[in-house]
Image: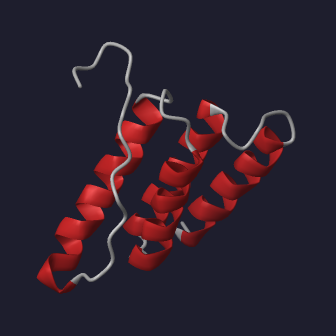
Amino acid sequence: GDRALAIDHAREALRHWQTKRSSSDPEVLYMRTEIASHSYSLGQVDAAAEAYAAVIRDARPDTGIVLVTAHLGMSELELARGPQSSRHVPAAPLSCVGLPA
């Protein structure tokens, strides 16, 4: 199949979801992390980094697993980029229910 269509379908799903929810809704943010993950899978590292950084910026501190997922995504991207990376997205403090601080 056309792998690039995966992002198109995910973006379309997000568009429909956003008509009913706020941009900081955890389920909307989760969809955005999925799009970031798809971007990374397609080799679009900069687009994925921008998408993860936007989720981190837009998420409330108590969003929990969505913030964890975005930070882990950024971690994977930075490992893939290697030591030449000059970009830095500061880690926001996490307040996750059921997870140690």
- The figure's colour scheme reads secondary structure
- In the image, taking residue 42 as reference, residue 55 lies left or right, namely right
- In the image, taking residue 2 as reference, residue 99 lies left or right, namely left
What residue lies at 43% left-to-right and 72% top-to-bottom?
42
- In the image, taking residue 28 as reference, residue 39 lies left or right, namely left
Where residue 78 appears, as percent x and y from the top left, is: 24, 68
Picture layout, residue 73 above or below residue 48? above
Picture layout, residue 89 above or below residue 101? below
Farthest residue toward the right?
19
Image quarter in which the C terminus is found: top left
Where residue 3 appears, as percent x and y from the top left, is: 52, 68
What residue lies at 40% left-to-right and 67% top-to-bottom?
40
The mark total stands at: 0
Using the rendered view, name the quadrant where residue 60 is placed. top right
Farthest residue toward the left?
83
Where residue 82 appears, as percent x and y from the top left, is: 15, 78
Front residue (pair 17, 2): 17
What residue lies at 67% left-to-right and 63% top-to-bottom?
8
Front residue (pair 15, 84): 84
